[in-house]
Image (spheres, helix red, strand yellow):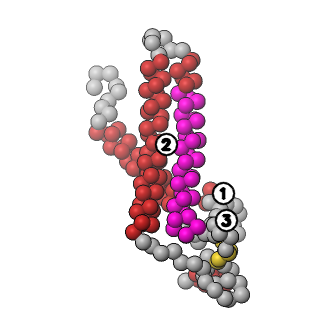
Amino acid sequence: MLQNMARLESPTTMTGSSGQKATQAGASRTGQGTAPTVAGGPGQKATQVGLILLMGLGSVTLWLLSPLFWIWLGSQMQKSSQPSMGPYLLVLVGIGVTTVVIAKLLGAADRAYGRVVTGGLTGRRRLPWNRSLRGERDVDAGQPPTVLTTVMVISVGLAGLLFVLWFFTLAGSSLPGQ
């Protein structure tokens, strides 16, 4: 309740794609007008769900499919049992490059989701990992995490859970004679 009141007192100005200015709190500084509302039709809901699924697939690709692909490709390049530097370098560079590319695409999908939800209004947002560690209170501290942050946390949590399940049930013992 107090956070909502604080937002009403100091609204965040956001600019739409057509150059119109609106405030996040719903009223302009002069007290006239409200922020444009976005109609939540079935097309918009389908777009939102599609973007969330795309971000989920992108996060699985980022953490699982891309590294497995590059390790497989590096193993196919190795013809003998003696290791050479080429496949290792290919795996290292390939994973690094695809991680950057997929992360950029995920960021673009998150921004597209934000445009769909807010109807084209954009505003400056400081992400939690980029905030000051000092004790002062941030203006935007009450903002919920982005959809991409939530999707990534869920995907990493599921990956950890699947690893633990695999480790204790399917991995078997690496000790000799067991």
Residue 38, position in %: x, y?
Answer: 51, 74
Q: Nearer the viewer, mark 2 or mark 1?
A: 2
State if disc 1 and disc 2 touch (CB < 8 Å).
no
Give yes or no for residue 100 being in the magenta stretch. Answer: yes
Where does label 1 land, which residue? Answer: 130
Give yes or no for residue 116 being in the magenta stretch. Answer: yes
Q: Residues within 10 Å of mark 1 (few under 14, many from 20)?
A: few
In the picture, the disc for residue 62 is 2
The relative height of residue 2 versus residue 160 in the rendered view (above or below) is: below
Residue with the most extreme front position: 18
Name the residue nearer the viewer: 49 or 131. Answer: 49
Q: Earlier in the sequence, mark 1 or mark 3?
A: 3
Inspect this view and state whether residue 160 appears.
no
Q: Residues within 10 Å of mark 2 (few under 14, many from 20)?
A: many
SS type, badge 2: helix
Which residue is depicted at the point 38% across and 42% down? 163
Q: Earlier in the sequence, mark 2 or mark 3?
A: 2
Q: Is residue 11 left or right of residue 91?
A: right
Where does label 3 land, which residue? Answer: 124
Which residue is depicted at the point 44% across and 39% down? 64
Q: Is residue 157 left or right of residue 114?
A: left
Q: Magenta residues: mostly which secondary structure?
A: helix
Which residue is depicted at the point 45% across and 42% down? 61
Residue bounds of the magenta highlight: 91-120
Q: Is residue 174 left or right of residue 150?
A: left
Q: Earlier in the sequence, mark 2 or mark 1?
A: 2
Which kind of residue does numbered mark 2 sit on?
Answer: Leu
SS type, badge 3: loop
Which kind of residue does numbered mark 1 sit on?
Answer: Asn
